[in-house]
Amino acid sequence: MPWPEFLPLFAFMCIGMYLMRLIPISVLSDRELSPRTKTLLGYIPPACFAALVANDLLSPSMFLNGIWPGLMPLIATAVVVLVAAKTKSMVWCIVVGIAMYALLGFVPL
């Protein structure tokens, strides 16, 4: 897309994103949210994180290189879920996830 066509589109998108962030903040800044709304808004970060993780783990092309390369991330994820349930520590989940993925990479299949 040439620059003269791209720049107006980019400007309109930037203005739209700015307004979508500014309007709720300015409208809700002087109001107290109900406890139910606060509870519902608390579900947004875990849902976004879960969507990002699921998008990285499950793809239509995950088994193109074979069964084992497609299963490695799923096995590492299962171990991380067990560690998360046991320790409830993000640091241990990261360490175990990286270690499991690296160890599974050394399995000759």
Image (cartoon, helix red, strand yellow):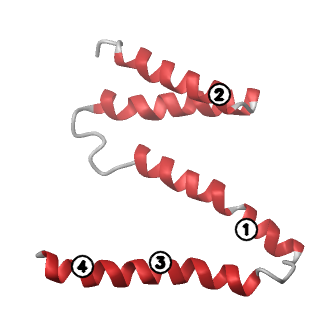
Q: Earlier in the sequence, mark 2 or mark 1?
A: 1
Q: Which residue has dot 3 on it?
A: 17
Q: Residue at x 58, y 77 (%)?
A: 21
Label 3 packing within 10 angstroms: few (<14), some (14-19), many (20+): few
Circle 4 is placed at which residue position? 7
Which comes sooner in the sequence, label 3 or label 1? Answer: 3
Give the residue type that dot 1 points to: Leu
The N terminus lies in quadrant? bottom left
- Three-letter residue code for mark 4: Leu
- Which of 1/4 is in front? 4
Q: Of the residues tagged 1 and 4, which is closer to the observer?
A: 4
Helix, strand or loop status at disc 1: helix
Asked if the residues shown at circle 2 and circle 1 are in contact, with their CB atoms under 8 angstroms apart, the answer is no
x%, y% of residue 11? 34, 81
Dot 2 corresponds to which residue? 91
Q: Residues within 10 Å of mark 2 (few under 14, many from 20)?
A: few
First along the sequence among labels 3 and 2:
3
Q: Mark 2 and mark 1: span between their CA atoms? A: 25 Å
Residue 62 in percent (x, y) is at: 31, 42
Give the distance between the C-alpha atoms of the residues marked 3 and 1, in whole angstroms: 20 Å
Q: Which residue is mark 1?
A: 41
For label 2, the SS is helix
